[in-house]
Amino acid sequence: MTAPASLDLSDGGAIPILGFGTGAMAGGMSAEAVLTALKIGYRHIDTARKYGTEAAVSQAMRASGLPRQDIFLTSKVSHENLRPADFARSVDESLAALKVDYLDLLLVHWPNPEIAVREYMPALAKAKREGLTRHIGVANFTTRLLEQAVALCPEPLAVLQAEYHPYLEQTKLLTAVRKHGLVFVAHCPVGRGRLFDDPVLADIAKTRGRTIAQVALRWLIQQNVAAIPFSSKPQRIAENFNVFDFTLTGDEMQRIAALKRADGRVADPAGRVPGGWD
Ligand SMILES: NC(=O)c1ccc[n+]([C@@H]2O[C@H](COP(=O)([O-])OP(=O)(O)OC[C@H]3O[C@@H](n4cnc5c(N)ncnc54)[C@H](OP(=O)(O)O)[C@@H]3O)[C@@H](O)[C@H]2O)c1
């Protein structure tokens, strides 16, 4: 099975299946890393108001010399800014920091137990109607919250972004995403490094002459799930993009799916998800 370079979005256009994350944890993230990614061929850059990386992304986009329309640019509104006036201000701040007049994808970064989904779906839709973003979506929503968002948003949602890698079961969420015609974008696709000692992944990587990161990314894109790995290191940024010329067998795909663990989640800020993960 081959993997496409991009996935069609339900409201037109497409999203590159492999992107570059800029939400680095410790160690930070530099404009050089984004520029390296753009030079290697990444055309989907994932940032967020909360990361503080929008200015660096802007600098790299400019330094790359690439036309704006060649880059699929995602940013997000954080959970503290979901009330209507805050929401609009956050979007304006993102556009100003990125020095662009539109985003390709605007996401609600996390739900907020103190703010109902119905309060901010109109603000998300408004950003799209005003041309501030081409597509909209939600991140870190459970299936239950996604159902609410789809029902309450006056404009179609195109993307759900959530953690997904071999240690985290996401079958239920993936089924809901597909039912509504959305694209699933996997964050933390190499499990923030947790996968790298896994013997099954090591065995498959050895058989294929690849690295564990490449096998994990290939496993996602072979499910038609987009992935946005981050690395600060040029060699790894290149390695993570080099996943389009090999194919995992059905047996390998299943062996990897069987690695899911109850404690597999790595991005889980306490109390952020109303009702908890389901
Ligand atoms: N919506 C959300 O709430 C949310 C949450 C989390 C993440 N995200 C997005 O998803 C992106 C990716 O997630 P993430 O950065 O947390 O986790 P990740 O991509 O799973 O892992 C990144 C870590 O893995 C290491 N790494 C990457 N490629 C490697 C390779 N080939 N070999 C060895 N080590 C490798 C990197 O270290 P080095 O730098 O040392 O290579 C880095 O520490 C973020 O940058 C962000 O854009 C979104």
Image: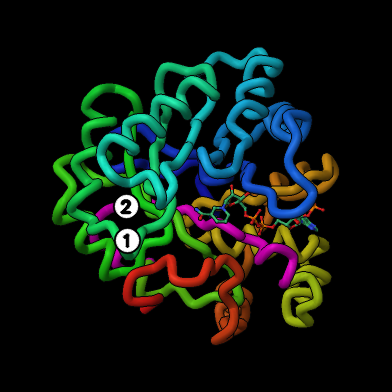
Find residue 144 and report its horizontal and vertical position in percent.
26, 70
Amino acid under label 2?
A: Leu
Q: Where residue 177 is drawn, which disc sits there? A: 1
**Residue range highlighted in magenta:** 174-194
The foreground one among 165 and 246 is 165
For image coordinates 55% across by 39% down, the residue present is 47
How packed mark 2 is, by other alpha carbons closer than 10 Å (few <14, some 14-19, many 20 or more), is many
Q: Position of residue 87 (x, y in %)?
A: 33, 38
Q: Is residue 181 magenta?
A: yes
Q: How is the image coloured?
A: rainbow
Name the element at disc 2.
loop
From the image, which quarter does the C terminus lie in?
A: bottom left
| Between 36 and 232, the one nearer to me in the picture | 232
Between 29 and 254, the one nearer to me in the picture: 29
Q: Quadrant of residue 141?
A: bottom left
Q: Residue at x 61, y 70 (%)?
A: 266
Mark 1 and mark 2 in contact? Answer it, CB < 8 Å.
yes
Q: Which mark is residue 182?
A: 2
- Name the residue type under label 1: Val
Residue ID at (42%, 56%)? 110
Q: Quadrant of residue 107?
A: top left
141 over 258 or under it: above or below: above
Along the horizontal axis of the image, is 183 left or right of 84? Answer: right
Q: At which x and y percent is residue 95?
A: 46, 23
Quadrant location, ligand no. 1: bottom right
Q: Is residue 177 magenta?
A: yes
Across and down, in percent, residue 31 comes to: 73, 29
Identified at 28% across, 30% down, the residue is 127
Residue 151, picture quadrant: bottom left
Q: Secondary structure at mark 1?
A: helix
